[in-house]
């Protein structure tokens, strides 16, 4: 590697590291103080950078807030533990839905995701101009797992296992039931759900779907 590319790579690495420090500091600050009471000065001090550096990287506080929400959403949208064999066997639809529901609750009711959800609710009420930012970066649902489940339900419906022509609606009903019961049981994410609670909530949501749409898999 020649000197110029080496310097460029080093510069890019330093820039990425500095950007990560700013995002980490901003995330901590927004969750601790809220959007309004978090200043760029506070973020700069916590990240050990200048205010100008933050402006150079992100433009303004609103844009940085958008990046923070996007980062939390990306973390909440990582369902790497999903087994690709789930919801393929008609005989295990109910059990598989319980498994998917339990993972959904674990991710969407995690401490950070719950804290950001509460932050969004409070800040949008005080700052209506942030509504679109929050809507664009919603962390309340798991978009990737929603798409995954919709596809699985579509395949099961085509195979005659489920009686529905709207798999996306069915997936939405499943996640809505999980979200409602999970939020209530965890006091909106302020109390961690136990494994047994999560399993019971997932079982209720799975029974709802199976009883409503399964052709021959009663529970």
Image (tube, helix red, strand yellow):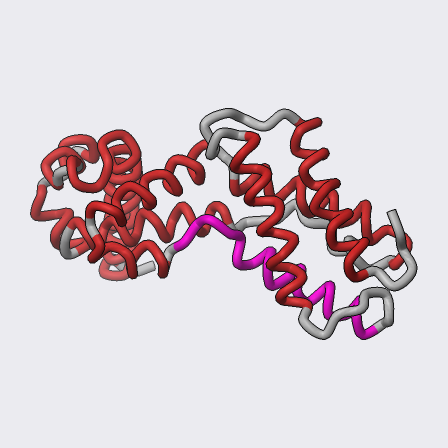
Q: Is residue 7 visible?
A: no
- Magenta span contains residue 58: no
Q: Nearer the viewer, residue 164 or 45?
A: 164
Q: Main secondary structure of the magenta part?
A: helix
What is the quadrant of the N terminus in the image?
Answer: bottom left
Q: Please report the residue visible at 17 percent of the width from the left and 37 percent of the height from the top.
A: 38
**At which x and y percent is residue 42?**
14, 33
Q: Nearer the viewer, residue 62 or 209?
A: 209
Q: Please report the residue visible at 26 percent of the width from the left and 37 percent of the height from the top.
A: 30
Examine the rendered structure and indicate whether residue 195 appears above or below residue 34.
Answer: above
**At which x and y percent is residue 212?**
77, 58
Q: Is residue 100 visible?
A: yes
Q: How many marks?
A: 0
- Magenta span contains residue 139: yes
Q: Please report the residue visible at 14 percent of the width from the left and 32 percent of the height from the top.
A: 45
Relative horizontal placement of residue 12, taking residue 153 as reference (left or right): left
**At which x and y percent is residue 185?**
57, 31
Q: Quadrant of residue 147?
A: bottom right
Q: Quadrant of residue 201?
A: top right
Q: Nearer the viewer, residue 178 or 56?
A: 178
Examine the rendered structure and indicate whether residue 142 appears above or below residue 164.
Answer: above
Q: Quadrant of residue 47?
A: top left
Residue stretch in magenta: 138-158
Q: Please report the residue visible at 24 percent of the width from the left and 55 percent of the height from the top.
A: 130
**At which x and y percent is residue 131?**
28, 56
């Amino acid at each position: 590697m020649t000197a110029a590319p080496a310097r460029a790579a080093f510069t890019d690495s330093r820039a990425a590291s500095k950007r990560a420090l700013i995002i980490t500091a901003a995330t901590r600050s927004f969750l601790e103080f809220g959007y309004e009471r978090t200043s760029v000065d506070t973020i700069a001090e916590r990240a050990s950078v200048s205010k100008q550096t933050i402006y150079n990287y992100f433009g303004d506080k609103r844009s940085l807030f958008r990046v923070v929400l996007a980062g939390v959403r990306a973390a909440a949208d990582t369902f790497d533990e999903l087994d690709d064999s789930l919801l393929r066997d008609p005989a295990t639809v109910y059990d598989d839905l319980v498994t998917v529901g339990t993972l959904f609750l674990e991710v969407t009711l995690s401490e950070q995701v719950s804290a950001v959800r509460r932050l969004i609710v409070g800040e949008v009420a005080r700052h209506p101009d942030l509504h679109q930012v929050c809507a664009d970066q919603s962390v309340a649902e798991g978009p990737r797992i929603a798409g995954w489940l919709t596809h699985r339900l579509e395949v099961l419906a085509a195979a005659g296992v489920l009686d529905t022509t709207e798999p996306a609606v069915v997936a939405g009903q499943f996640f809505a039931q999980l979200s409602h019961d999970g939020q209530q049981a965890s006091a909106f994410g302020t109390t961690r759900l136990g494994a047994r609670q999560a399993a019971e909530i997932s079982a209720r949501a799975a029974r709802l779907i199976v009883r409503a749409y399964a052709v021959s898999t009663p529970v």
